[in-house]
Amino acid sequence: MEEKTNILIVEDDYEIARIMKDHLDREGFQVTWASTGVGGWELRKLYYKIRLS
C-alpha cells in the first residue's frame, strides 16, 4: 500500500478550508488543517519535515 502525501492547510475561513480538504482527500492526500498561523506553525514542527510556501 502506497503512503499518502501529507498536506498542511492553514486557512482561517472554515468553508474554504473544508472545500480544499475535501478535494485533496478525494485526490488521495492526507490533509491536516490549522485555522491560525500559530496553529499551522506548531503542526508543522510536529508533523512535517519540509515547509512549502
Image (cartoon, rainbow, N blue to C red):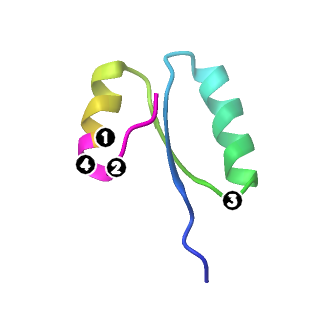
| Residue 46 shown left or right of residue 6 in the figure | left
| Residue, far top | 13
The amino acid pointed to by label 2 is Tyr
Boundaries of the magenta span = 45-53
Q: Earlier in the sequence, mark 3 or mark 4?
A: 3
| Residue, far bottom | 1
Q: Which of 5 and 38 is in front in this view?
A: 5
Q: Position of residue 26 (x, y in %)?
A: 75, 53
* Residue at mark 4: 46
Q: Residue 48 carries which label?
A: 2
Q: How far apart are marks 3 and 4 (CA)?
A: 22 Å
Q: Which of marks 2 and 1 is nearer the N terminus?
A: 1
| Residue 6 shown left or right of residue 39 in the figure | right
* Residue at mark 3: 28
* Residue at mark 1: 43
| Residue 18 shown left or right of residue 23 in the figure | left
Give me the residue at 57% from left, 64% from top. Answer: 4
Q: How far apart are marks 4 and 1 (CA)?
A: 5 Å
- Label 3, residues with CA under 10 Å away: few <14, some 14-19, many ≥20: few
Q: Which of marks 2 and 3 is nearer the N terminus?
A: 3
Q: Residue 15 carries which label?
A: none
Q: How far apart are marks 2 and 1 (CA)?
A: 7 Å
Tally the numbered discs: 4
Vertical position of residue 1 compared to residue 47: above or below: below
Q: Do the residues labelled 2 and 4 touch (CB within 8 Å)?
A: yes
Q: Where is residue 31 in the image (x, y as percent from the top left)?
A: 54, 47
Element class at badge 4: helix
